[in-house]
Every structure is written in structure tokens, then in C-alpha cells.
Image (spheres, rainbow, N blue to C red):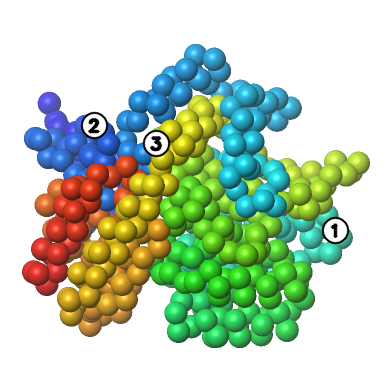
């Protein structure tokens, strides 16, 4: 009997993986709390929340029960023309903790589709107002997903190079990271002084995840949003990674004085248990679609739109924030990251240490460029895996993004594994 790894290598095609160079994947048998259990007693600390989705730890019985109970009531039904309690309750609950101007919730399946929906809402908003605008503005090095619209508004690079000529009209401005704030503002002003067809500005608020955990201040984002608002450009906050507590508040945009017109949510919304994408819109956006003319409706939907199981998991996860005082845990992680960052400063191979909420990141000084394909990446990844810690460096950027339920000694173990790697390099 072949083992799981060999069977997998014959039939499965894994995401973001060069299958020729890495044909074998690590088998996982079970997950509990912050731990992933492999074969032969191998255990991994999930220090990246399983691609940034996990919130309360794996296998949380409260979420498991909510999904099970929901399955017995209704596991799925069409969402066009029909509704159900979990979708309505989740919308009510989410809007009560979202930025105040968010008024409507649109359902899809994942972060990329939440972004597609957000882009389409903004483009059709202008179309429905008989003032078509087709250009979008994004940040260089942004990552918004892998579908065509999401790729179009993402920074141009290796992930989307094969499709570049098919991507639509997007103007990019430098990310407003420390030192580049004025450059970013000037670029935005320059675009808006030569174009009057800009529909929307899309951004990952405060932390740009896949582009290298780049961080920037709420103040500069507010300034960029001020400029957009003065020029009638809609703002789309892509909170797929930053939402649900990741940056220390429920949503990163809640660190701002401005509010977005459209906001995307996914990843942590179900606590990391089920796929779900949500796009929240202000009342003004929603109203632009109300008409006696059927053609002004938003013609978008997916087979699993509004899936009740994903909604039930999300409601349970939001309830756990109150039951388990999750924001206290988030604060504790942030305080521990601050101590870790202080210790990191003594390493000459470390630069650009940054923290936002539960995320800590730094660059490994390198003769190569800071990039996803920096050769230190595989060396670091393999070392951490050998030590039983799942960390996925973005090139030479090392970061920790743990489930909020991580116990202090376990987080200490993640830190000490990183220190031991730094001692080696
Ligand atoms: C900010 C942001 N937007 C969108 C996405 C795409 O989400 P998904 O992988 O669920 O399609 C991601 C994924 O990492 C993301 O970080």
C-alpha cells in the first residue's frame, strides 16, 4: 500500500508550488489548537494560521458544533430569491462590528471573489450613474488574489506575468511605506490631475501581506483616501487578510478617520474553518443599483453564495471573540511581539523590523533583492519545518502571523526557533 505522500504526488496539483522541484507535500493527520499533526509523531506549530485564516485554533468545538447543528437544519440552498437565518444573522452581526458606514453584505466564496465583487460594484456604480469610469488605482506590490480582476489590481510581478497583456487598465502608485509617503501621495495626485475616469482606489489597509508584509501608517492612508474622496474616487479596502482582528482592531480601517466605500472580508471570517468571501458596501453604493430598470441589478453570484454552513461557522467565530475575550489575546500577542522585536534588533542580519497587531515581520539582510524568490527562502522554510514550526517566509521576509489562541510558551518556541536560525545565518 502506497503512502499518502506518494498517492498525492500522482494525482494532486498543489497551489503556489513548482511541482517538479517540490513534488512531495507534508501529510497532516489532524489539527488541534495551534498544532498540526503529521506522520510519525511529527508536530508543527501553525505560526502562519494556515495561510492567515485560523483565528481561535484548529478544531474548536464551538465552531464544530455550530457547523454540525446547521447541517442538520439546512446545509445549502439557492440564495437568489431565497434567504436563511445564518446569512441574515451573520450580516447583522458583521455590520455591527464593521466601520459604521458599511450597510450591505454580498456573499461569495473566497478572498479573490470578494475582491472581484468589490471591483465590479465600483465599476457598475459609475455605469449605473451614467458616468462610466473604468480605471482603477492600486498599490505597487499589492496582492489581491488570483482571479483576473484581482490579478489586474495586484502589483505586476511573477505571479501574474503570463497574463499581463490580458489584465485591465490599472494605475499603480508606490506603497506609502515609511520614507515613500510623499512619493505615493504625489503619484496619486499626478494620476488624478491627468485622468477623470478613475473609478476606485483599492488597497490592503496598513499591511500588504503577500507583497512582503509591508506596513504603513493609518495617517498616510487617511491622506490618500482624502485625496480620493476630493476627486470622487471610491475607496475599496481589501481586508481579506487584515480583517477579523489581525491588526489589533476588528478591521484595519478602524484605525483610520476615513471609511471605505467597499470592503472585502474572507480568510478569518469563518475562524479558518470554511471558505467564505464577503463584500461590504455603503448605502450609497447599494442605492446605485436600485432601479425600475432590471439591467441595473448586480448580476453576480456563485453556486455556493451565502452557504449556511460557512455563515454558521462565522457567527460562532464572532461569538467566540466575546466568549473568549479574543481581543485580550490579540493584545498579549502584540506585547510579546514587541519584546521579540527588541531582541531582534541585536542581529546585524535583520533589518526593517515591523509590527502591526498580531503580525511581526522583518527582512533578512541579503545581497539579492528583497523578493519572493530570494534564495534564503527555501533554506529558512526547511529549517523551520525541521524544527517543527510552520513559517512561510516571503522570500527574505520572515513573519509570524499566529492564531490568536496561541499559548505564550508556544509563541516563545516560535521566537526561539527564529533566533536559532538567525544564529546559523
Ligand atoms: C489582501 C488579500 N486579498 C485577497 C486575497 C485572496 O484571497 P483568496 O486566497 O481567499 O482568494 C488574499 C490572499 O492572500 C489577500 O491577502
According to the picture, the residue beneath numbered tag 1 turns out to be: 129
Helix, strand or loop under label 3: loop
Above or below, 387 relative to 154:
above
Residue 189 marker: none
| Location of the C terminus (image quadrant) | bottom left
Q: What is the quadrant of residue 258 in the picture?
A: bottom right
Above or below, 357 relative to 221:
above
Total label count?
3
Residue 30 marker: 2
Q: CA distance from mark 2 to mark 1?
A: 52 Å
Report x, y in % for residue 226. Answer: 68, 73
- Horizontal arrangement in the rendering, residue 349 relative to residue 79 (left or right): left
Q: Is mark 2 within 8 Å of ligand 1?
A: no
Q: CA distance from mark 2 to mark 3?
A: 23 Å
According to the picture, the residue beneath numbered tag 3 turns out to be: 324
Determine the residue positioned at 53% across, 53% down. 251
Q: Residues within 10 Å of mark 1 (few under 14, many from 20)?
A: few
Q: Nearer the viewer, residue 286 or 103?
A: 103
Report x, y in % for residue 312. Answer: 51, 28
Q: Nearer the viewer, residue 271 or 139?
A: 271
Helix, strand or loop under label 2: strand
Q: CA distance from mark 3 to mark 1?
A: 45 Å
Amino acid at each position: 500500500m502506497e503512502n499518502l505522500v506518494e498517492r498525492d504526488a500522482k494525482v494532486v496539483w498543489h497551489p503556489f508550488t513548482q511541482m517538479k522541484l517540490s513534488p512531495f507535500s507534508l501529510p497532516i493527520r489532524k489539527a488541534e489548537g495551534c498544532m498540526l499533526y503529521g506522520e510519525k509523531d511529527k508536530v508543527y506549530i501553525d505560526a502562519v494560521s494556515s495561510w492567515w485564516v485560523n483565528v481561535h485554533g484548529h478544531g474548536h468545538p464551538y465552531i464544530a458544533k455550530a457547523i454540525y447543528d446547521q447541517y442538520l437544519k439546512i446545509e445549502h440552498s439557492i440564495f437568489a430569491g431565497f434567504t436563511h437565518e445564518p446569512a441574515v444573522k451573520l450580516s447583522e452581526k458583521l455590520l455591527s462590528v464593521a466601520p459604521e458606514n458599511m450597510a450591505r453584505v454580498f456573499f461569495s466564496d473566497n478572498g479573490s471573489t470578494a475582491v472581484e465583487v468589490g471591483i465590479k460594484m465600483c465599476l457598475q456604480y459609475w455605469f449605473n450613474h451614467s458616468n462610466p469610469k473604468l480605471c482603477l488605482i492600486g498599490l505597487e506590490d499589492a496582492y489581491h488574489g488570483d482571479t483576473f480582476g484581482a490579478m489586474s489590481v495586484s502589483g505586476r510581478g511573477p505571479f501574474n506575468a503570463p497574463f499581463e497583456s490580458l489584465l485591465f487598465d490599472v494605475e499603480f502608485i508606490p506603497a506609502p511605506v515609511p520614507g515613500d509617503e510623499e512619493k505615493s501621495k504625489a503619484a496619486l495626485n499626478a494620476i488624478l490631475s491627468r485622468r477623470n475616469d478613475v473609478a476606485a482606489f483599492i488597497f490592503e489597509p496598513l499591511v500588504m501581506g503577500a507583497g512582503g508584509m509591508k506596513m504603513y501608517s493609518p495617517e498616510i492612508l487617511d491622506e490618500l483616501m482624502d485625496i480620493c474622496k476630493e476627486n470622487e474616487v471610491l475607496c475599496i479596502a481589501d481586508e481579506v487578510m487584515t480583517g477579523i482582528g489581525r491588526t489589533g482592531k476588528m478591521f484595519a480601517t478602524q484605525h483610520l478617520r476615513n471609511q471605505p466605500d467597499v470592503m472585502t472580508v474572507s480568510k478569518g471570517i469563518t475562524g479558518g474553518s470554511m471558505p467564505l468571501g464577503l463584500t461590504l458596501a455603503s448605502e450609497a453604493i447599494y442605492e446605485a443599483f436600485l432601479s425600475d430598470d432590471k439591467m441595473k441589478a448586480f448580476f453576480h453570484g456563485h453556486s455556493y453564495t451565502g452557504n449556511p454552513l460557512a455563515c454558521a461557522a462565522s457567527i460562532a467565530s464572532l461569538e467566540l471573540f466575546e466568549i473568549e475575550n479574543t481581543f485580550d489575546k490579540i493584545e498579549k500577542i502584540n506585547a510579546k511581539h514587541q519584546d521579540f522585536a527588541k531582541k531582534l534588533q541585536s542581529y546585524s542580519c535583520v533589518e526593517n523590523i515591523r509590527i502591526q497587531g498580531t503580525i511581526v515581520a522583518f527582512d533578512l539582510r541579503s545581497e539579492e533583492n528583497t523578493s519572493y524568490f530570494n534564495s534564503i527562502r527555501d533554506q529558512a522554510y526547511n529549517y523551520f519545518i525541521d524544527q517543527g514550526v510552520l513559517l512561510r517566509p516571503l522570500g527574505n521576509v520572515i513573519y509570524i502571523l499566529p492564531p490568536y489562541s496561541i499559548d505564550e510558551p508556544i509563541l516563545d518556541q516560535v521566537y526561539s526557533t527564529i533566533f536559532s536560525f538567525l544564529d546559523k545565518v
